[in-house]
Amino acid sequence: MVEHSAVEVENLYVSYGSTPVLVNVGLTVPAGAGVCVTGDNGIGKSTLLRCVSSLQQPDSGAIRVFGAEPGDSPAFWATVATTVEPPTWYLGLTVREHAELVCRAHGQDPEDAGIDEALERLGLGAHADAIPPSLSSGQKQRLTLALVLLRPSSLLILDEPEQRLDPDGRAMVAGMLAEYLSTGGSLLLASHDDKFAVASGAEIVTMEQLSGGEDR
Ligand SMILES: Nc1ncnc2c1ncn2[C@@H]1O[C@H](COP(=O)(O)OP(=O)(O)OP(=O)(O)O)[C@@H](O)[C@H]1O
C-alpha cells in the first residue's frame, strides 16, 4: 500500500490581480508530522493554507492531501480540521452546546469525546454556559481551537493558532498539538512564534525556503 504524505504541494502559483504572492511554492508535510510555515506579514502564509484547505483555488500547481486533490467533499472535511476560516457562532447556543454540536456532527458522543475535560483544559470550564459572542478575543480563540481539537481528524491546518493567547494558553495549546501529533495526527501551521511551533512538535520552514523561483 502506498503511504501518502499528509500534504504535498508542487509548483504552486497564486496572484492577486497582477501581484504574484505565491511563486513556484513547494511543501511536504509527511503523514504524522508537523510543519510550521513562518515569514513576514503579507508573504503568503494564509494564502498557502487556504489553498491546501481547498478554500482558495490557486492559479496553477498541484496540491494533494493524503494523496487526493483537496475539495469540498465530505471525505475531505472528515479528514481535515482547520481554523483558516473563522468559525460562525450559532446565535443562542452556549460554549458547551457548540462543543456538543461539533461532536455529534462528527458521530461522537460528547461525553466520550471529553468535552468537559477539553473545555476545562482550555480555561473555558467557567464559561461553558456563556454564549461565544460574550467571550473575550482570547477565549474565542480557545473555543475555536477546542472545537477543531475535539472532533476527529487526520490533519489540522491552523493559521496562527497562538494569536490572542496569553503565555499559559500558548504553552497549553502547544502541548495539545504535540499530543495530537503523538497520536498519529498531521499538522500544518502558520505562525509568528517559533517557540510555540517548536513546543507543538512542528518543524519550522520559512516561506522563502518553500519558494522555488520563477521557473513555471
Ligand atoms: N483577497 C485578497 N485580495 C487581494 N490581495 C490579497 C487577498 N488576500 C491576501 N492578499 C494579499 O496577499 C498577500 C499575502 O497575504 P497573506 O494573508 O497570505 O499573508 P500572510 O503571510 O498570511 O500574512 P500575515 O503574517 O500578516 O498573516 C498580502 O500582500 C495581502 O495583502
Image (spheres, rainbow, N blue to C red):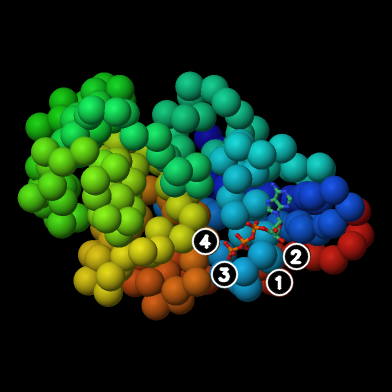
Disc 3 element: strand
The disc placed on residue 208 is 1
Marks 4, 2: nearer the viewer: 4
Q: Are marks 1 and 3 in contact (CB under 8 Å)?
A: no
Which residue occupies 42% across, 69% down? 197
Q: Would the CB of label 1 be found within 8 Å of ligand 1? A: no
Residue type, label 2: Ser
Residue type, label 4: Ala
Distance, label 1 to label 2, CA atoms, is 5 Å
Q: Nearer the viewer, residue 205 or 173?
A: 173
Distance, label 2 to label 3, CA atoms, is 12 Å
Distance, label 4 to label 3, CA atoms, is 6 Å
How far from the left and from the top, in percent, is residue 138? 30, 59
Quarter of the figure with the C terminus: bottom right
- For residue 98, above or below residue 195: above
Q: Would the CB of label 4 be found within 8 Å of ligand 1? A: yes
Residue type, label 3: Thr
Q: Are marks 4 and 3 in contact (CB under 8 Å)?
A: yes
Distance, label 1 to label 3, CA atoms, is 9 Å
Near mark 2 (Cα within 10 A), the count class, few <14, some 14-19 or many ≥20, is: some
Near mark 3 (Cα within 10 A), the count class, few <14, some 14-19 or many ≥20, is: many
| Residue matched to label 3 | 38
Image quadrant of ligand 1?
bottom right
Labels 2 and 3: the sequence-earlier one? 3
Residue type, label 1: Glu
| Residue matched to label 2 | 211
Q: Are marks 1 and 2 in contact (CB under 8 Å)?
A: yes
| Residue matched to label 4 | 190
Q: Nearer the viewer, residue 43 or 137?
A: 137
